Amino acid sequence: MDASSRILSELASREQALDQQIEAARLEAAREVEAAEAEAARIMRQAEADLQSMQAEFEQVLARQSAEIRERAQTEAQSEVHAAQTRSEGKLAQAVETILRAVLP
């Protein structure tokens, strides 16, 4: 084998080695991309689960606050009704007393 054949053979070997390294790097990059996509999908699923949990918690808080507001409003309304009834009874008693004084000597 002459020198030029050895050089060509050596260059072919180096090219083949480089091709193998490039293929190995391409496969490694593909695995890393696949792993990154899987991690991104996991993160998205977790974010969606967290969002649903937060929405459910918000709805519970909102429902509880609404119930508390309704209860306070009902209690205040009952107090106002009771106060109005008490005032009405007092005015009725005064009216009866006034009528009795006017009619009875």
Image (spheres, rainbow, N blue to C red):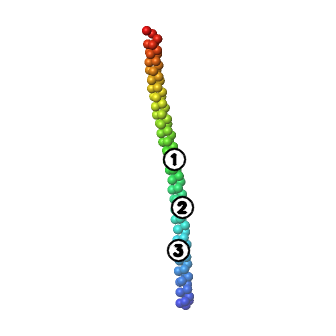
Residue drawn at (54%, 80%) of the image: 15
Q: Position of residue 13 (x, y in %)?
A: 54, 81
- Residue corresponding to mark 3: 21
Residue drawn at (54%, 63%) of the image: 34
Q: Earlier in the sequence, mark 2 or mark 1?
A: 2
Q: Residues within 10 Å of mark 1 (few under 14, many from 20)?
A: few
Q: Looking at this view, is 61 or 4 the one in front?
A: 61
Q: Looking at this view, is 50 or 19 the one in front?
A: 50
Q: Label 2's element?
A: helix
Q: Label 1's element?
A: helix
Q: Position of residue 4 (x, y in %)?
A: 55, 89
Say if 52 sits above or below 21 in the image: above
Q: Label 3's element?
A: helix
Cα–Cα span, label 2 and label 1: 27 Å
In this rendering, the label closer to the viewer, 2 or 1: 1
Cα–Cα span, label 1 and label 3: 50 Å
Q: Quadrant of the C terminus?
A: top left
- Residue corresponding to mark 1: 55
Residue 37: numbered disc:
2
